[in-house]
Image (spheres, helix red, strand yellow):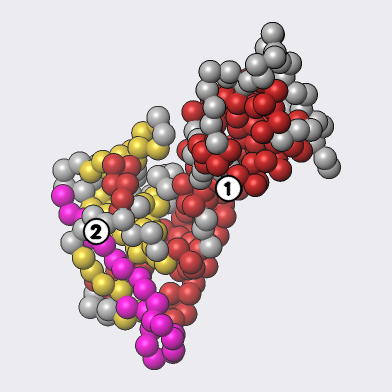
């Protein structure tokens, strides 16, 4: 098996004379490089891409975005060859959720934008292998523009697929997401971005799922955290400090937790705790009614 890496990097201050250096390496580095994304161009031999539950056998000139930290996405057979281009992520403007959407997605090199990108990059590779190790600014910038167009097409295709989801599929996805939120309510880093990334969907589609159900992601997370806090405070056999409770359920601070709780239920957490654990209460107190969300 032969794997060839072509590293395309820009100089700190590009100039017509400096160009963009293309280096040949034996294989893709086994590191977690968060500043770059790798684009592989298939040349020959059996290479399989694993994306979600699907596996795709690449054909010559096919493309796939890769991450050195996720080499399990590619399975190499005997006597195969690929060319890898190392491109700074900042040139593509990719966020983490968007990067997750394009990594491991096979792109056919014989049609559409994939054909243009594959042909242009293959020509650059041939130029480098012929002994000309320096590529001028103009071809390098053209390559980056083509990659940007390819990325946008992949993201738009993902959005189109999401929009075409059947109602039943969307409901199943929403149920899985809600179950995931329940399992991670105590995670202070739980956010629309992390939730979308965990389910390999865009933040826009995530928001759409909750919007169709009459809510928002942030509102749902906040309500579930508040309900969990209310239940914990209502246990007569257990007392806890507001600071510990706020920290445990992912609120940024005790004051933020208190304001959010009062805004939702019309009383402070301390008042609810006192009511729930009152020695004079002969029956469990009625749960406070959550106020309507303000616009």
Q: Which residue is mark 2?
A: 29
Which range is magenta?
A: 1-21
Q: Which mark is residue 252?
A: 1
Q: Residue furthest bottom?
A: 17
- Residue 120 horizontal side relative to residue 159, left or right: left
Q: Secondary structure at mark 1?
A: loop
- Mark 1 surroundings within 10 Å by alpha-carbon count, few (fewer than 14), some (14 through 19), many (20 or more): few
Which quadrant of the view contains residue 286? top right
Coordinates of residue 249 in the picture (x, y in percent): 54, 36
Is residue 212 visible in the rendered image? The answer is: no
Q: How many marks?
A: 2
Q: Secondary structure at mark 2?
A: loop
Q: Is residue 126 magenta?
A: no
- Residue 255 horizontal side relative to residue 248, left or right: right
Residue placed at 48% from the left, 66% from the top?
Answer: 90
Coordinates of residue 16 in the picture (x, y in percent): 44, 89
3D distance between C-alphas at marks 1 and 2: 38 Å
Vertically, is 254 above or below 137?
A: above
Callout in the foreground (1, 2) = 1
282 or 14: which is nearer to us? 282
Q: Is residue 17 magenta?
A: yes
Is residue 66 visible in the rendered image? The answer is: yes
Which quadrant of the view contains residue 250? top right
Vertically, is 89 above or below 292?
A: below
Mark 1 vs 2, N-terminal side: 2
- Residue 226 horizontal side relative to residue 239, left or right: right
């Amino acid at each position: 098996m032969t794997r060839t890496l072509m590293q395309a990097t820009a100089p700190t201050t590009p100039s017509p004379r400096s160009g963009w250096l293309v280096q040949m390496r034996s294989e893709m580095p086994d590191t977690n490089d968060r500043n770059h994304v790798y684009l592989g161009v298939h040349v020959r031999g059996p290479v399989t891409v694993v994306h979600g539950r699907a596996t795709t056998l690449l054909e010559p000139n096919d493309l796939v975005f890769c991450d050195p930290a996720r080499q399990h996405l590619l399975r190499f057979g005997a006597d195969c060859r690929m060319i890898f281009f190392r491109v700074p992520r900042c040139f593509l403007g990719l966020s983490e959720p968007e990067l997750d959407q394009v990594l491991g997605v096979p792109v056919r090199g014989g049609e559409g934008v994939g054909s243009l990108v594959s042909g242009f990059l293959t020509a650059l590779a041939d130029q480098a292998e012929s002994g000309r190790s320096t590529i001028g600014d103009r071809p390098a910038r053209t390559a980056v523009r083509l990659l940007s167009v390819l990325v946008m097409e992949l993201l738009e295709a993902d959005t189109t697929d999401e929009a075409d989801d059947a109602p039943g599929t969307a409901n199943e996805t929403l149920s899985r997401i809600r179950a995931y939120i329940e399992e991670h309510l105590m995670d202070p880093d739980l956010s629309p971005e992390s939730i979308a990334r965990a389910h390999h969907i865009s933040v826009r589609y995530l928001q759409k799922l909750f919007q169709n159900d009459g809510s928002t992601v942030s509102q749902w997370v906040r309500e579930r955290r508040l309900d969990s806090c209310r239940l914990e405070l209502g246990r007569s056999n257990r007392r806890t400090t507001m600071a510990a409770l706020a920290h445990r359920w992912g609120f940024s601070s005790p004051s933020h937790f208190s304001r959010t709780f009062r805004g939702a239920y019309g009383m402070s957490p301390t008042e609810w705790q006192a009511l729930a654990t009152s020695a004079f209460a002969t029956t469990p107190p009625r749960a406070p009614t959550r106020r309507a969300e303000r616009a």
